[in-house]
Amino acid sequence: METEFTRREHQVKILVSGLGYIGLPTAVMFAKNGCEVVGLDINEGVVNKLNKGILHLEEPGLASELKSVVKEKKFRATLHSEKADVFIISVPTPNIENALKSCDLSYVKAAVNTVSKNFEKGNVVIIESTIPPRTMSDIILPLVEEKGLVVGKDIYLAHCPERVLPGQILHELVYNNRIVGGITPECTKKASEVYATFVKGELLKTDSSSAELSKLMENTYRDVNIALSNELVKVCNQLDINALEVIRLANKHPRVNLHQPGPGVGGHCLAVDPYFISATIPSVTPLIQEARKINSTMPYYITNIVTRLVKDQKIKRMTVFGATYKGNIDDVRESPALEIYEYLEKNLGIQVSLYDPHVHQEYSLDLYDALEKSEFLLILVDHDEFKNIPEEVLNRMDRKLVFDTKNIMQNTNQVEFYNMGTIQKILS
Ligand code: SAJ
């Protein structure tokens, strides 16, 4: 798409710092849409691979796009910063392992300090990494102005949080609405022109603090709602009521959307971002903190039930289905499923096998082997492969007892079946 930005006399040059799951697809999209793109990373192996057109991570569609932009010399990777018109920072912001789990901004600050020596009048600087509220105005703005450039006049600074879903990144980068939060209205305008190069969703113009907090609240909203449903499971377990039936009925109300309970919340977003709010203002965020506690302790809730069941029923061999943090992906970061498996394997004193068709590591056994002589199947992830487990596979089991924490299994009439709505019945 032609904009005021791409109509400049010279080809626009963009430097993307951080070539991970978000930075690399973003860099490739700009390269595909008429910009000269340089990708900066501290990992020499990654830089060498990318310059040969080889991908270092998994994302559908990205491999071929990378190859073509490298071949057409629109994208190259480097270890050293250089001059550009636009600088985009897309580096990790993990939790610090302290009591509040506050945000580790060291990678963002290091990235800004590295590229800032190349800043010139007229540049646009965009932070895409997820950051706590007021980081732009209180931390990044002073770092940029140290270079003697006035933000909003000489140089334009904005926060444009990424909101794409792994597995659908190339599509969502183009079609999702994009929040653009400048330090000043002029900064917002300049940063919007950058994204108008390829974004077909709406460009939601705002200030930098609103941009920071709205991104965090999107994931916090989901985390708190999932915690509410996990709490409902505990209530129903005590009162002998089916939690899934309660959710189904309540969600028929036009203004109610109870989320799905499960063995916990994983990944690098929902299990991380709420802490960026609560660590900033602990005194007024009891709800966010409690939701995190409920979700992060769900694996214990499940392992307690399973431990009692295994003892009561004298189970000698069990199987776990699923290791990833959610269904149909290969990502095990912060995975509650893996946490549950590792606990059971270490503490139950019986044989525990793990099967995951999406994870190619030493523990993903063959499907048949995993269920051979098993007496109990625990499903922890909603992969499509677990919807209809073939009868001949189930027939390998010595006893067909199934606890499905994601309510994904459909051919339940062939087994003794329990889910999060009926767990109380397993133990009685
Ligand atoms: N989960 C439940 N019950 C539910 C929904 C999810 O237990 O009803 C669990 C999942 O099993 C998983 C976790 O929550 O363990 C997170 O999964 P998810 O699909 O909700 O989200 P992510 O972490 O893969 O991606 C989110 C997305 N945010 C929203 O949908 C608001 C994505 O758009 C963001 O880009 C991403 O976080 C991010 O980078 O912030």
Image (cartoon, grey):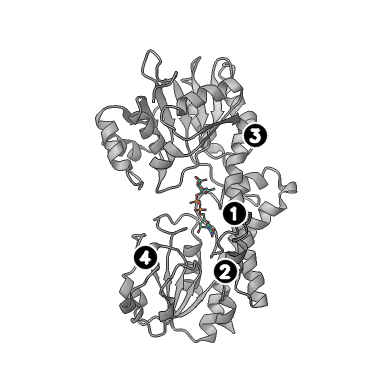
User: Residue 116 — which label?
Assistant: none
Using the numbered discs, state the Cα–Cα distance from disc 2 to disc 4 in whole angstroms: 22 Å
Q: Is residue 196 left or right of residue 286?
A: left
Q: Which mark is residue 244?
A: 2
Marks 1/3: CA distance? 22 Å
Taking the spot 37% from the left edge, 15% from the top edge, the residue there is 10
Using the numbered discs, state the Cα–Cα distance from disc 2 to disc 1 in whole angstroms: 18 Å
Q: Which residue extends farthest top?
A: 9
Q: Name the residue under label 3.
A: 134
Image location (x, y in percent) of residue 274: 61, 48
Find out whether the residues at labels 1 and 3 contact each other: C-beta distance under 8 Å: no
- Residue depicted at 41% across the width and 43% down the height: 169
**Residue 142 placed where, x, y %?**
62, 25
Residue at the spot of label 1: 223
Are dots 4 and 3 in contact, CB under 8 Å?
Answer: no
Mark 3 falls on what kind of element? loop
Residue picked out by circle 4? 385
Counting every numbered tag in the picture gives 4
Residue 389 found in image quarter: bottom left
Q: Can residue 54 be seen in this view?
A: no
